Amino acid sequence: MPAKLLDGTALSQQIRGELAGRVSSLKAKGVTPGLAVILVGEDPASQVYVRNKVKACEVAGMHSVLELYPATLTEAELLARVQALNADPAIHGILVQLPLPKHIDSHPVIESIAPEKDVDGFHVANAGALMTGRPLFRPCTPYGCMKMLEAAGAPIRGANAVVVGASNIVGKPMALLLLAAGATVTICNSKTRDLAAHTRNADILVAAVGRPRMLTAEMIKPGAAVVDVGMNRVPEGQPNAGKLCGDVDFAGASQVAGWISPVPGGVGPMTITMLLVNTVESTERSAR
Ligand code: GUN
């Protein structure tokens, strides 16, 4: 495999190690960073994600609260829970896991989170702050991707960066972070004509589409840095059916790319690590 690995597990360990000192300093002042995670409904993947987030808090010596609600919870009930957490001084970060059940509009829920506790960085105030170059919280997944590229020493300034996927959670904030770092950024979406023509020009390629192994070796520029945000199951009938896989065909792409992140062990652990970083930052701000 010519490509160097963007190892999210190793980088996470390093960053979480550095974070431990900041958590200790806060605790010495009598403040324990606290994160509240809310999940509505029984989506199995979301259940795994929220448990991993809460577990990471415990390992980091932070306070965490996991609130699990049935899919029948009303929007009004959810808004009331967020309001209570906004007012709770032991909570410095609030995360409502997405997607929410169909009967709940995610926008008013996200806008109900106090911006200074919005460790996801999804509130319009935080999205606007990121867009105007004064971010309070960077969304965790794109933030983690940037850290991986920076740690690897992949050139960003002046690079052609292509982000495949335009979600509010990953694609759009990823593009803004790359732009702020001096990249020339293209955002592709499901309607993009001749996707490969764009991706083949990418010095940095971020895949966040949610389609298993959609980006293949022929679509990648030799030497590119490839960051795979996908978290899919291998479809039935293919080798390793049911196992986790990314949006990038790792076996092929790793023969062409200069750097590549694996799934699992790439962006996933970094997302959780940056959530811890954001929660500690939030706590430090409130303790000032
Ligand atoms: N669903 C998928 N990724 C995320 C995330 O980073 N935060 C939240 N709240 N929900 C998600």
Image: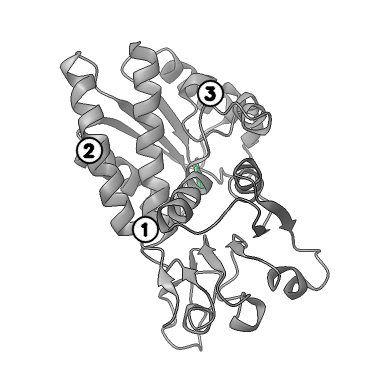
- CB under 8 Å between callouts 2 and 3? no
**Residue in the image at 35% along x and 44% along y:** 273
Q: Is mark 3 within 8 Å of ligand 1?
A: no
Q: Quadrant of residue 280?
A: top left
Q: Which residue is mark 3?
A: 113
Q: Which quarter shows the C terminus?
A: top left
Q: Which residue is mark 2?
A: 60
- Furthest toward the left, the residue is 28
Judging depth in this view, the residue of 224 and 9 nearest the camera is: 224
x and y, in percent, of residue 54 in the image:
30, 40
Single out the mark in the foreground, 1 or 3: 1
Q: Quadrant of residue 115?
A: top right
Q: Which residue is mark 1?
A: 8
The CA span between labels 1 and 3 is: 29 Å
Query: Is residue 164 among the parts visible in the rendering?
Result: no
In the displayed structure, 246 sits above or below 229; it is below
| Secondary structure state at the residue bearing disc 1 | helix
Judging depth in this view, the residue of 147 and 94 nearest the camera is: 147
In the displayed structure, 181 sits above or below 266; it is above
Q: Is residue 133 left or right of residue 55?
A: right
- CB under 8 Å between callouts 1 and 2? no
x and y, in percent, of residue 203 in the image:
62, 65
- Furthest toward the right, the residue is 193
Three-letter amino acid code of the residue under disc 2:
Ala
x and y, in percent, of residue 256 in the image:
54, 81
Three-letter amino acid code of the residue under disc 3:
Ile
